[in-house]
Amino acid sequence: MFTGFSDATVDFMWGIRFNNEKPWFEAHKEIYLKEFYQPMKELGAEMYDFISEKRPEDALVYKVTRIYRDARRLHGRGPYKDHLWFCVEQPAEDWTARPTFWFELAPEYWSYGMGYWMTKPVEMAKLRARIDRDPKTMTKLTKELNKNSEFVLGGEMYKKPRAQAPSELLAPWYQMKNIAITHEEKLTDELFSRNIVERLKQGYEFLLPYYDYLLTLRSDPEPETLK
């Protein structure tokens, strides 16, 4: 059971940022496993159980990222990440190729939310076509998102909208290449206790309707403009 991160968690993250090399990591590996990886794994397992209970029909999986960077993508950086995250989603050939719940902890911030990062252009076209057919559903979801104080809509955007939205309120969805509904803030005391568990549960429950909406896009018919 997750009981909170610790000062040692934060110390390790800053340590690996400024000492990103194998000798330092090997000397502090037990601290990493005990104070960073294990609590992250425990928190991810609790959130997996919570979301699975809410959506028992979905065959969900969860994963904690490895601290080791992909050697093909170092780009002059050290071999280790200074942050970790977990994800909960339906299994897919490519990780985050489905709508995904996540939590991330870094030396100076934490974040969580729901994202659909590896979307194909056809899936975003399906999103726009669905909104065209039924703007009321997304209007309701967008109003709820704009009213809430926890999450904001983000993601990579085209320079120009891909189509004309039915309203100004819905226009941002027509400019998205991918989607992330996120919360981010500086490290807070609740991370060091079980208080963060309840906050994440409340947040993920709020995000479930958006997850459901995006998850079913694959089954929508291909828009006429792409045929």
Image (tube, rainbow, N blue to C red):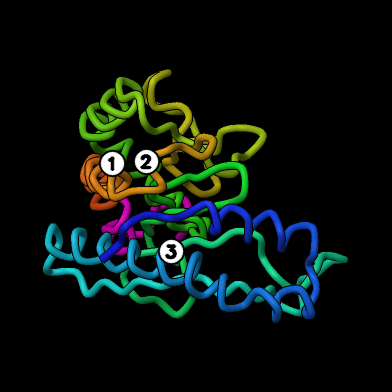
Task: Please report the residue visible at 22 percent of the width from the left and 28 percent of the height from the top.
Answer: 140
Residue 81 sits above or below residue 137 on the image: below
Q: In which quarter of the image is the N terminus?
A: bottom left
Give the numbered dot on residue 199: 1
Determine whether 135 is above or below 35 in the image: above
Q: In this view, does 197 lie above or below 165?
A: below
Crowding near the residue tagged with mark 2, few <14, some 14–19, many ≥20 C-alpha atoms within 10 Å: some
Q: Earlier in the sequence, mark 3 or mark 2?
A: 3
Q: What element carries label 2?
A: helix
Q: Nearer the viewer, residue 90 or 107?
A: 107
Provide the residue span drawn in magenta: 214-227
Q: How far apart are marks 3 and 1 (CA)?
A: 16 Å
* Mark closer to the observer (3, 2): 2
Residue 173 rendering spot, x and y as whole percentages? 44, 35
- Where's residue 153, x and y in %? 45, 34
Amino acid type of disc 2? Answer: Glu
Sort mark 3 into few (<14), some (14-19) or many (20+) by Cα contacts within 10 Å: many
Relative horizontal placement of residue 217, taking residue 181 as reference (left or right): left
Contact, mark 1 vs mark 2 (Cβ under 8 Å): yes
Q: Is residue 225 in the magenta section? A: yes
Question: Which residue occupies 47% across, 45% down?
Answer: 111
Which residue bears the numbered disc 2? 190
Residue beneath disc 3: 86
Instruction: Quote the CA–CA distance across marks 1 and 2.
Output: 9 Å
